[in-house]
Image (spheres, rainbow, N blue to C red):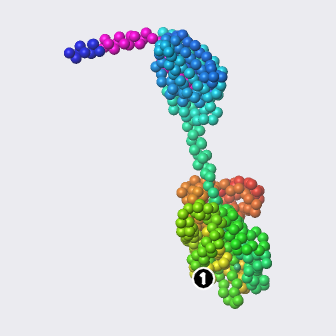
Amino acid sequence: MMFKRVVIFCVLFCSWLTVSHAANSIEKIRIVEHADKTRIVLEVKKKPLLNVYSRSKSTQIVVDFASTKNKVSAWKLAKQSSNILRIEHAKSKNKADTRLVFHLAQAIKYKNFELVGSKRKNYRLVIDLPVKPFSKRVASKSKVVAKAKYIAKPKTISKAKTSAQAKKTIKKITLKKTPKLRDVVIAIDAGHGGKDPGSIGFKRFVEKDINLAIAKRTVAILNNKKGIKAVLIRKTDKFISLDKRSAIARKYKAELLVSIHSDGFTSSRPSGASTLVLSNGRAKYEMNKKLRDNNLDDLLGGVGDAIKSSENSDDLQRTFIDLGQDYSLTAGYQVASNVHSELSRVTGMHKSKPVEQSLAVLKSIDIPSLLVEAGFVTNYKEGKKLTTRAHQQKIANAVAQGVYKYFSTMPPKDTYLAYALRNPQKARRLASLHTVAKGDSLSKIASAYGVTIARLKQYNNLKKDNINIGQKLKIPTS
Ligand SMILES: [Zn+2]
C-alpha cells in the first residue's frame, strides 16, 4: 500500500521535473567587488538568446534572456556592491522570458563578455563595471565580507576579512583614545585690586598684591592638571566690581569660583588662614533680590526664558533656583572643606572649619563659590611670609589640591575627569603626554605629575635640563 503511493508520487513529480528541465534558467548570480571594478557573473544553464544594453543615461543595465526562467532572488544581491543600488526582476509579457535591470549608483560604461560552459559548467555572462567600488573609497568593506559565500576565491576573502576586521579594530581604538570631553573650568579671583588695596599690614604688605601672586600660582598649578582649565578673573592690578567678577566667571562657564584674600585686623595678634562659604541667608537674600529685579536670565543662563513662558512660572523659578542654589552651597562647602584641610598641612589655621558667612564677595549663588583667606597681613610674621614665593606657592598648592580633589571625585558630566574616574587606566595613558607650555620647567612638570626630574629626563632621553615650548614629554605612569 505504502509502496504504491510512493511510486505514484514519484511518477508525478518526475514528470514535472522533466518539463522544467527543458527550459533554460538563470542558476546563479555572483557580484564581486574588486579593487578597481565590480564584476557581475550570471550563470545560465545553457547559452541563452540574450540582449544586453544600457539605458537611462548609463545608470541602468538591462539584460534580456529569451526563454529563460530566473531561479535567483536577485534583489538581495544588490547589497553586495556599492555600485549597484538595486536589481529589478521585470516581468515580461511573454512569461517565458526574463529581464534583469541593474540600477547603478552612477553612470557607468559597462563591458561584457561570455564564457561558454563545458558539459559540466554553466554558461556565464560576465558584466564588468570598471569603477572603483564605493566600499573601496568610503563605505565599509565588511558588507562584502558578510556575504562572502557569494565570492569565488576563498583566499582573497580571508585576506579581505582580516584587513577589514583590523581596520574596524583600529577605528574603535582611535575613537576611544580621543574622547570628546570637556575640562572643568575653575575661576580664580584675586581679591581687591587697583584703587582698592584691601588690607595693609606691616612694612606695607598689601593684600591685593599678595592675592594676585597666590591666584596666579594657583591657576598655573591647576592648569598643569589634565581635565582642569583654570582662569584668572583679574590678571593685573586693576579694580573690578564684585558684580563684574561674577559675570566674568559666568562668561567662562566656570563651575567653581575661588576668591583669594588675605586677612587684616586692627590688632596684630590674629594669624592663620581660613576658608569661607556663602551662608544660606546670603544666598536666599540674593535669590529674592534677583527675583525682584526680574534678572533671571543671567542667573539661569537662558533656561529662564523657557520657564517664564510656562504656567506657574513664579513657583518654577523659585524651585529651579532653589535646586541650583542647593548644589552651589553644598559643592562650595565641600570644596572649602577640602581646601581647609589642605591648608592646615602647610600653614596655621585661624578657624577649625570653613566659616559660613554672608559675604558680599561671594555674590554668585549660581556658581559654587568659596573664599580663601591666605593669612593675616596685619600679623608681622605671617605678613612677611605671605610675600615670599615659597609660602605663596604652598598656599596655592593647597588651594589647587583641595579643588582638584573635589572635582576628581565628584566630576561634572561629560568631563575628562568623569571619564578618568570611570577609566583610571585609560585616563593615565591619555594623560601620559605633556606638551610643554610657556613657563614650564622640568621641575614644574615633574612636581605636577608627581615624578622626579631624574626619572622624567631618563624617560625622555633628555641630556640637558632645557625644554622647548610645544615639545611633547612622555610622563612615566608610576
Ligand atoms: Zn580681602
Whether residue 452 is visible to the viewer of this picture, yes or no, is no
Picture mark count: 1
Foreground: 217 or 367?
367
Residue 210, quarter of the rendered image: bottom right
Q: Nearer the viewer, residue 300 or 332?
A: 300
- Secondary element type, mark 1: loop
For the point 78% across and 83% down, which residue is it?
A: 204
Q: Is residue 276 above or below residue 139?
A: below
- Does the image show residue 62? yes
Q: Is residue 19 magenta?
A: yes
Quarter of the image for residue 314 reads bottom right
At a point 77% along the width and 59% down the height, the residue shown is 466
Residue furthest to the left? 1
Nearer to us in this view, 101 or 258: 101
Residue at 72% from the left image edge and 78% from the top image edge:
386
- Measured as percent of width and height from the top left, residue 66 is found at 52, 12
Q: Position of residue 244 (x, y in %)?
A: 72, 70
Where's ligand 1: which quadrant?
Answer: bottom right
Q: Position of residue 89 (x, y in %)?
A: 51, 22
Comparing 21 with 200, the one in front is 21
Residue at mark 1: 351
Q: Residue at x 60, y 20 (%)?
A: 61
27 over 374 or under it: above or below: above
Amino acid at the residue labelled 1: Lys
Q: In screen coordinates, is 211 left or right of 102?
A: right
Check if residue 166 falls in the magenta segment: no
Residue 364's image quarter? bottom right
What are the residue bounds of the magenta stretch?
A: 10-33
Q: Dot 1: few (<14), some (14–19), or many (≥20) neighbours within 10 Å?
A: some
